[in-house]
Amino acid sequence: MGLVFYLISAFAVGGALAAVLLKNLVHAALALTIAFFGLALLFLRLDAQFAGFAQILVYVGAVAILVVFAILLTKGSEVPKDGVFSKSWLAGLAISAGVFAVLAWAVMQAAPSLPNESAVPSVSVNDIGNALMSRYVLPLEIIAVLLTAAPLGAVIVAMHEKAGKQEKLGAPGPGSPRTSSGSWGGDFVSETWETRKN
Amino acid sequence: MPNPLSGYLIVAALIFAIGLAGALTRRNAIMVLIGIELMLNAANLNLIAFWRYGPHPELLTGMMFAIFSIAVAAAEAAVGLGLVISIYRHAKTSDVEQMNRMKG
């Protein structure tokens, strides 16, 4: 429990607070990367080098970029006039404060019986690779299937539904009337889709 | 802090509560997802802390749990943000208070 732990914790918690409180979504996403980076530093301080660098690669590298892309694609960077917090913000705040109070109380109650300072575990990346390929090979394969299926599902969900409908109806010609209002996907998207198809 | 493990657990609880508050109080759907990501990360910090101070760190159980959790969270983020973009295209809003119908 040194000064470094308190500094890194303040970094991570401050980043998380800023991510939740900032009005501009792009700023919130940047604060989120700071929180992820602080958590990665905490992982490194816990002698979990592999998990720490995986955290930096996956969260700071990929998830933050995804969030920024989603913000820019949904015009979320404009601050809404009627506030960024919902009408029931007081209830949400009370629930989260209650959850924190219960968790902190439980940790403080259990603190005397928790294991104290132990020897640094000597775990190399070699050991992690061996464990992944022997004992944890089934979860690894399932994760591989999930990581293949999830981006495909994300692309199919984010792609508009209209294209499939039109193909089912038998590819109407360029002169045929299109009923684009109100259905999934805007005019712009369906037009680019049609030009690509023709 | 009486011992190091409880310090990490308190930090994880704090980040979890902040993420929960963000998911419950923000109106933008992307901010709700950001709150969920913070909660998942707090859980990962708990897993790593218990792995480090647990009785058998050489078995790598908590570490593996955290690594798989990171992978699942990445997949969840991709699908969630894809859903937000799809809903935004349809409803022209990413405000969760205006998304009150499941069908068109």
Image: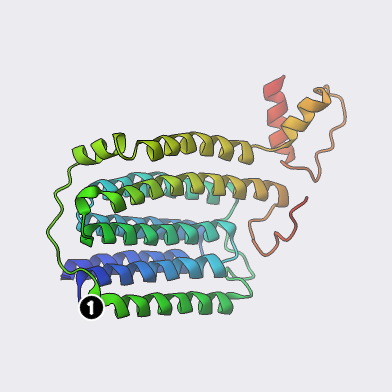
Asked if B29 appears above or below A167 in the picture, the reply is below
Task: Determine which residue is flagged by label 1.
Answer: A112
Name the residue at the top extreme: A198
For the N terminus of chain A, the quadrant is bottom left
Number of marks in the image? 1
Which corner quadrant holds the C terminus of chain A?
top right
For the point 63% across and 56% down, the residue is B94
Residue A125 in picture, x, y percent from top left: 21, 40
> Which residue is painted at 68% across and 38% down in the image?
A160
Left/right placement of residue B23 relative to residue A121 reads: right
Q: Quadrant of residue A5?
A: bottom left
Residue B48, position in %: x, y? 29, 57
- SS for callout 1: helix
Q: Which one is in front, A165 or B60?
A: B60
Of all chains, the one bearing label 1 is A
Residue B78 can be seen, yes or no: yes
**Left or right: where does residue A155 sit relative to residue A98?**
right
**Measuring 73% from the left and 31% from the top, which residue is drawn there?**
A163
**x, y percent for residue A57:** 33, 44
In this view, B15 is above or below B56: below
Residue A175 vs residue B19, the one in the foreground: B19
Q: Nearer the viewer, residue B72 or A91?
A: B72
Q: Picture quarter containing residue A35?
A: bottom left
Q: Disc 1 marks which amino acid?
A: Pro
Residue A104 in picture, x, y percent from top left: 36, 77
Q: Residue at x 59, y 61 (%)?
A: B28
Viewer-nearest residue: B73 or B83: B73
What scheme was used to colour the molecule?
rainbow
Residue A27 shows up from this direction:
no
